[in-house]
Amino acid sequence: MDYQKILENVLIKMTGFQELGNPASYIPELRKVDPFKFGVHLITKKNKNFGLGDSEEKFSIQSISKVLSLVMAYQLQDEDLWKRVGVEPSGTPFNSLIQLEYDQGIPRNPFINAGALVICDILVEHLKNPKDEFLNFVRKLSGNSELEYCARISESEKSVGYRNAALINLMKDLGNIHNDIDTVLDFYFNLCSIEMTCRELARTFLFLASYGLNPITKEKILSSSKAKRVNAIMQLCGFYDEAGEFSFKVGLPGKSGVGGGIVAILPNQYSIVVWSPGLNKKGNSSKGMKFLELFTSETESSIF
Ligand code: DON
């Protein structure tokens, strides 16, 4: 398939699409990002690369990191993981508090903020230097050994992180956080602060399009059964209360972040990342979703 040509055609089809959305406003540093940035990168299992626009510019990957922390925790804990976090779509916004008390402090899934905080708690429990080890894991997957946490963004989020503090306090009270709250929150804000280009991020996720094997380095990251399960969670929970809409329109497992990035994978074929900072009302990239909808229609490639 001539992916470069297809990406360009889809971009032309996007011309009439006016719903730019607004960059996340609740994290001061994200508010400053130029809403007109737009990048796409697709990498195939055979390491063929295709890109468009601002695909080599770094952006804040935010919640997309939650997939990588889940993968690391899954490597360490196997199926015991699911005693502390569920695998059901939440149908609620990513930072909602309401469901958590009702569910006795067991978050519905690892991608809502509460679930991602539990995963961070598990990593803090298992790893000697969670921040260093997580960063090294992401560096290896991305092929960029110089990736760093972005202190400017993590500090900015920490300065307004009242909701995440509320979520973690509630879970501590209900017995599902085992470590010091500030240590876990600090780790969480840091992993959300990582900045990557579309190209780096697409490569990072390629192992999930390849049954858990990194096809570039030949390293087995997850068993194929675990990779299947992570993809299933992305399919059902990757877009919070818009997961149904994304499945309906795009038809691929994926994950969004409030930095405006979306990653999606087609098993055995490719990993694709779109970045456009303007978000819709559900906190997902508005143009990013539209681009992927047109792309999977044009290529007739979806898991359904
Ligand atoms: O905790 C937060 O609110 C952010 N660091 C991450 C939220 C996010 O990316 C939600 N995704 N669309």
Image (spheres, rainbow, N blue to C red):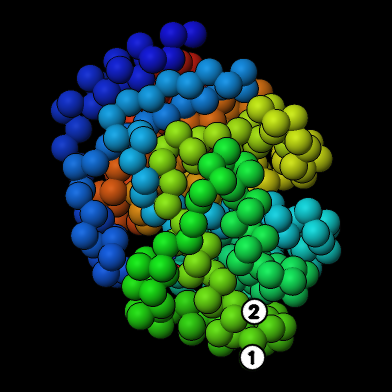
| Front in this rendered view, residue 147 or 156 | 147
Contact? badges 2 and 1 (CB < 8 Å) = yes
Whether label 1 lies within 8 Å of ligand 1 gets the answer no
Disc 2 crowd, CA 10 A, few/some/many (<14, 14-19, 20+): many
Where residue 282 sits, quadrant-wise, is bottom left
> What is the crowding at mark 1: few (fewer than 14 residues within 10 Å), some, or many (at least 20)?
few
User: Disc 2 residue type?
Assistant: Gly
In front of the other: 15 or 209: 209
Residue type indicated by callout 1: Asp
Is residue 85 depicted above or below 267 in this figure?
below
Instruction: Examine the image and state in which quarter residue 121 appears.
Output: bottom right
Image coordinates of residue 189 in percent, x first then y, are: 48, 70
Q: Can you see residue 245?
A: no
> Element type at marker 1?
helix
Q: Count the marks: how many?
A: 2
Query: What residue appears at the point 27 percent right and 23 percent down from the top-left corner?
Result: 11
Residue most toward the front? Answer: 146
Image check: 286 left or right of 244? left
The residue that disc 1 covers is 173
Picture quadrant where residue 69 is located:
bottom right
Residue drawn at (48%, 83%) of the image: 165
* Residue 44 visible in the picture: yes
